[in-house]
Every structure is written in C-alpha cells, then in structure tokens.
Image: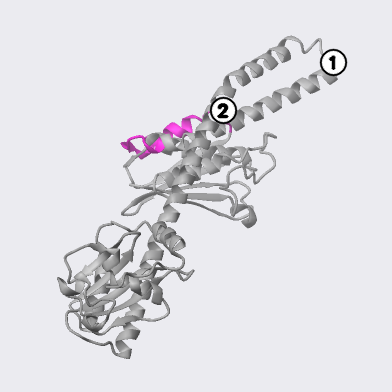
Amino acid sequence: MVKPAIHSREEERLLALDSYSILDTLPEADYDNITEIAAQICGTPISLVSLIDLKRQWFKSHHGLDVTETPREYAFCAHALNYSDTIFEIPDARNDIRFSDNPLVTNDPHVIFYAGVPLLTDDGLPLGTLCVIDNKPSKLTNAQKKALRALAAQVMNLLSLRKNKQSLEASLSMLEEKNRTLERFAYIAAHDLKSPLNSMISIVGLFEDSYASVLDEEGMKWLNHLSQSAGKLKGLIDGLLDYSRCEMVQKEIKTILFVKNIVAGVAGLFASEKNIAIELDTELTIVKINSTAIDQILINLISNAVKYCDKPEVKIVIKVTQSQTHYIFAVADNGPGIAKAGREKIFDLFEVGTKADKYGKSGNGIGLASVKRMVERLGGTIDVESEIGMGSIFVFTIEK
C-alpha cells in the first residue's frame, strides 16, 4: 500500500477547509440527495461526499455506507487531492500497487472500483471529493464523468452558500451588538444630560423673569439666544430618548383597546391648541395592540401635522382599517404637503425636511425616524402619500 502524498499547499488547504465550518456537522438532505443521484447515475452502491482533514477523511454524506470517517492514510480520496485537474479513477484496486493491500480493499467495504472528483475552492484548493465506489471492477463512461463533475460543482455551491450564510450571520450579529451598545450609550448620555439641562433652562427662565428690567437690549438678545439653544438641545435629547425606547416599547404586551379611546386620548393632548379638528374614520370597535407604541406614533404624526400646517384650521383625519394580518392606520392632514424629493428621505434619522415650523422652531430629524423604527419593530411598514398644497397621508401598519 502506498500512503497518499501530502498536498503541495496542505497548510492553505486545511485552513480553507476549516473556514467552511462543515466538519462533524449533522447530515443534510441536500448533500444526501446528491450522493444518491451520483450512485444512480454511475451505477454504484456507494457514493460519498468526503472531506480530508489532517488525519482522517470525514463523510458529510455517505450513501450506501454506514461509517462516517476513516483514517487518512487509507483514503482513496486523499490520493485524489493531488489529481485536481481530472477525475481520479481506479478501475480495479486489486491490480493497483497503491491500493492492493489497503484494508478498505481487503476488508469491508471492499473498495474495488473508485472514481472521485475533487471539490475545489475558487483558489483551486481541494477540500475532498465527491466519489462513487463499487465492490467489483468498473469504468465510468464520458457521460457519467460529466454528470459526476456537475454534481461535484453543486456540492461546492452548497458549501459556498453555507460559508456565505455564516459570514453574513456573523456580520449581522456584530452589527446588532454594536447597535445595542450605541443605543445604550445614546440613552445613558441623553438621560444624564437631561437633568442639568433642565436646571439650565429653569435658571435662564428665572433670569428672563427677574432681570429683564436690568439687562440692556444686547443682554436680553443673548439671553433669548441661550434660551432657544437650550430648548433645541432639550428637544434633541428627548428625541434621542424616544428613539432609544423603541426596543423597549416593542417588548410591551399587546392589550385590547377601543379605537375611539385611542384617538380621543391622543387628541386630548392637543386640546390647548387653537383651531384644530381631529376626526376618526373607522368601522372597527377594538384592536389588540401595543398601547404605548400606538400612542407615541400618533402623537408624533399629529404633532408634526399641527406644527407644519399652513392653514387657518388644522384638520386631521385618522382612518383605521384592517387586513387579515395587520391593522392599517392612515393619518391625513391638510398641511402644505411634501415634495417628492423630501418624501424619499423623510424617515431618515436626523434628516430635516423643513427649516422651521410655524412657531419658528427647527426640527431635529428624530421624530419620524423613531416612528419608522417603532412601526418596523411591530412588524409593519410606514409610507407617506403627499401632494404639494393638498396635505399628506401617513399610512402605517402594525402586525396583529
């Protein structure tokens, strides 16, 4: 018996094999289907997907054979690694000096005929073979050889898909961990900044009330500027806190709510606003939904409609319908509308569509991004339909 020679790029080959994380995995139907087809096409009782490790050959699929691995020094497939440019075929191992006294020939499973196609990476490194085995002499036809090569290519496609999937999952896991860390940092930073900022706003307000008669026009100008900047910063921090809470809101339990009560509760928050009408259009009586989430989504959309309305009276209609899988909410306003270019980025974080609202305050681009994130966390989608001068309709869905 002649032991198989070590591959000329053995170290690279073993690293490549390890990168697929395939060794010692459970059987899979996709590989078993290929070995079954290979055996049928070639007319052999045995077909294997064999991978050559440092000291063994391990079978990812073993049609017609009970064992899952053998020592490398006995492996026909280990010889085949060095014939990667062709099919390694042994018509009768008993007449071949390399294999005549091999235990796999003289004992079970009595390998007499062998034909193996190397499984090659894109770099030309052989990981193992797709092979067929018989216990009597044989020889493949050209058609059988062509079919065996095609099936070997499919094995490599499966291995590559597995590797790419694992790489993608690892990248997604790393990205999710980074996002969780960033969100936690943003929440802690915003939360810790909120208290001293509130104190600063209170002090500025005290100065404005108590020292307005003492400060000159220039001093009041700078004090007003400080007050506006502090208010803007507070809005940004509140927005960051809301954005960070999206994950926590998702975990809250759904409850059965009356639709009219949802809208009435949200509308009550805007009771102090003048010239505003909020109407409900629905045939639904109840919904089973996350109450905190729907409140935050509607408050944000209605607040934007109020702040950016250019009409004497703000008119908002909330329509609620349902499909078999989702509740569908449509929040329509009579505002100025949104240009097509603006609609494409309106839900992006920190993207501000309008410089200032009707009160002269500029947004921070967090509100609609938070709404979109929350809707998606609840298994839905959100979009906007709008025409300049004709208002906007925000349509979002929430999974039942």
Residue 189, label in figure: 2
Is residue 255 magenta-colored? yes
Work out whether residue 20 or residue 50 is closer to the camera in this orientation and state it: 50
Task: Name the secondary structure under disc 1.
Answer: loop
Whether label 2 touches label 1, CB < 8 Å: no
> How far across and down, in percent of the image, does residue 121 sit?
44, 68
> How far across and down, in percent of the image, does residue 3 sit?
31, 69
The disc, 2 or 1, on the residue closer to the chain's N-terminal end is 2
What's the residue at 58%, 47% (across, down)?
348
Boundaries of the magenta span: 249-274
> How far across and down, in percent of the image, does residue 68 sit?
22, 62
What's the residue at 23%, 84% (across, down)?
95
Residue 216, label in figure: 1
Q: CA distance from mark 2 to mark 1?
A: 36 Å
Packing grade of label 2 (10 A; few <14, some 14-19, many >=20) is: some
Task: Name the secondary structure under disc 2.
Answer: helix
Q: Is residue 360 above or below residue 83?
A: above
Residue type, numbered disc 2: Ala
* Image-quadrant location for residue 323: bottom left
Q: Is residue 48 above or below residue 334?
A: below
Asked whether residue 30 is in view, the answer is no
